[in-house]
Amino acid sequence: MKKYFLLVLLLAGSHVMVAQTKKNGVYTPDNGNGTFTNPLMWGDWPDPDIIRVDDYFYFVSTSMHYVPGSPVARSKDLVNWEMLSYAVPRYDEDPRYDMKGGNAYLKGSWANTIRYNNGTFYVGFCTPNTSRTEPGHFSICTAKDPKGPWKRTIFKEYMYDPGLFFDDDGKVYVAHGQERLFITELNADALSVKTPQKEVYNNPAFPYLEGSHMYKVNGKYYMMGSTGGTTGRQICLRSDNIYGPYEAKEVINDDHTYPGNGLHQGGMVQLKNGSWWFIIMQDRGPIGRVPNLEPVTWVDGWPMLGDKGKGVETFKKPDVGKTHPNVVPATSDEFNTAKLGLQWQWNHNPDDQKWSLTERKGYMRLKAGKAAKLSEARNTLTQRVQGPFSAGTVEIDVTGLKDGNVAGFGVFQFPYAFVAVQQKSGQKSIIMVNADSTVTTIPFKGNKLWIKASVTHIGYTASFDYSTDGKNFQKIGNMLNMALGLDWTANRFALFNYSTTADGVSGYADFNWFKLKDSL
């Protein structure tokens, strides 16, 4: 495998440098020499949790409102990861997930937890409710095969930032809460509550302690959680009894290579050789919450993260007894299969009558749905932007557009920006829209357009280019100042086609491919 190394700034004005390895133009942490470089995945994989089952490691992450939800990834060495499945194919408990009667932005899966017991995989998460009278609910998804299918059970109880735990005596618990931490006992199948929650910890010295995951090591119970939010640090609670009392210790307090954003919240796992490792996230602003891999050293019965109290940058890979191929989660897509690639998620439950990978072989066909603007368009197809630099490019055939259609490609969050072909009165125009304001309009008589969106962590901006021949690109519009209007959800590349008129819903756009690579 051919490798490339780039020196990149981690912050505008920062003097911290890191060697970046790439595979097929995409960042990979595996340096090919027995070492890895953090972050593990330079994109938005928040609230990580991990387990080991035999020779495989399994990773789960939060995905908020995106559908399918709760992504599950797999690795053989904790460094090279591939997408495996989603624990939630869609959300059926509220019509707003179908954009009926409102929207479901920021709902969905929060703070995922993954465990394995007696031949079954379990993924749990909470879904906060924006209503003050309805706190939300808790879900457990189960599968015999981590590739799925998964079955979801929704609890009436709400358990914030849950950590599922199977004790060695056969009992099942969930650790949950924020600042005030609770233990709730579940029934043996982990699909209903047996004993109501009991408060086990409440210490103002660690405000907003959350994201707790539970372990039992040498007869003692450990809860690993974070405090301080995005600037946070990782705290470990320890007790001889699951219901406490718990003593606390800070196990890492380091902003690593990204000043002001501490390593916080994640999961711990033991290897076959007895060593322990921890995957912990770090906020990288609008690009997302990226996972870092940290060694664990046990000191006086406490799991201390990192190397001498600091998060590692380049470090020796975990010893799993073998060397495994360099693998990264898929990004680029030729749309030449009948099944949607696992790199893609919709902004809400998709209208399956409005998209197809088979009507035109080798193309993703997006049929227009009625919407006044992009944030109200249901079938917006997205995937993560990548850091520290990335560019996504699409080829789009707009022959099938109808009056009122707006079909294109951009960077989606609040605010968002995009380049699209708009059709009015039978005439097409290329438009650049930023924060719902049309910045540029160019007459267009063709039927095929190439659009590129480029993202950088320096200043968190996105810029846009277009081409009418697929070779010569030119800038269009202005910069998007990427932000987090949808809290804790990173910016994403987005493909879309919506119609501002009812008559235009018969229109369609055909996307030939999406290609992602480093933008330098």
Image: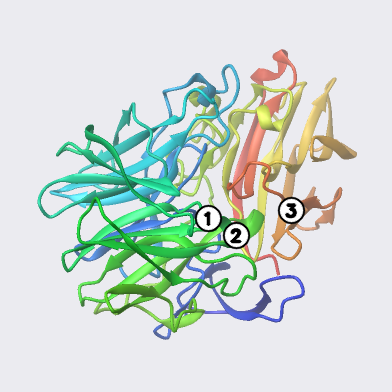
| Tag in front: 2 or 3 | 2
In-front residue for pair 173/375: 173
| Mark 3 neighbour class, 10 Å CA radius: few under 14, some 14 to 19, many 20 or more | few
Note whether residue 393 is visible: yes
Which residue does the image show at 29% across and 63% down from the upper left? 238
- The residue that mark 3 highlights is 470
Between label 1 and label 3, give the one nearer the viewer.
1
Q: Are marks 1 and 2 in contact (CB under 8 Å)?
A: yes
| Callouts 1 and 3 close, C-beta under 8 Å | no
CB within 8 Å, label 2 to label 3: no
Q: Considering only vertical position in the picture, is 311 above or below 370?
A: below
Identify the mark nearer the N-term, 1 or 3.
1
Element type at mark 2: loop
Work out whether 511 lies above or below 96. Answer: below
Mark 2: which amino acid? Answer: Gln
Upstream in the sequence, badge 1 or badge 2? 1
Residue at figure coordinates x 48%, y 59% from the top left? 205
Q: Residue 325: image x %, image y %? A: 36, 72
Residue at mark 1: 331
Residue assigned mark 2 = 386
- Labelled disc at residue 227: none
Which secondary structure lies at badge 3? Answer: loop
- Please, what is the three-letter code of the amino acid marked with disc 3? Gly
For residue 520, what is the image quadrant?
A: bottom right
The structure's colour scheme is rainbow
Amino acid beneath label 1: Thr
| Marks 2 and 3, the one that precedes in the sequence | 2
Q: Position of residue 484 (x, y in %)?
A: 67, 47
Q: Residue at x 51, y 54 (%)?
A: 207
Residue 75 shows up from this direction: no
Closer mark to the observer between disc 1 and disc 2 = 2
Q: CA distance from mark 1 to mark 2?
A: 10 Å
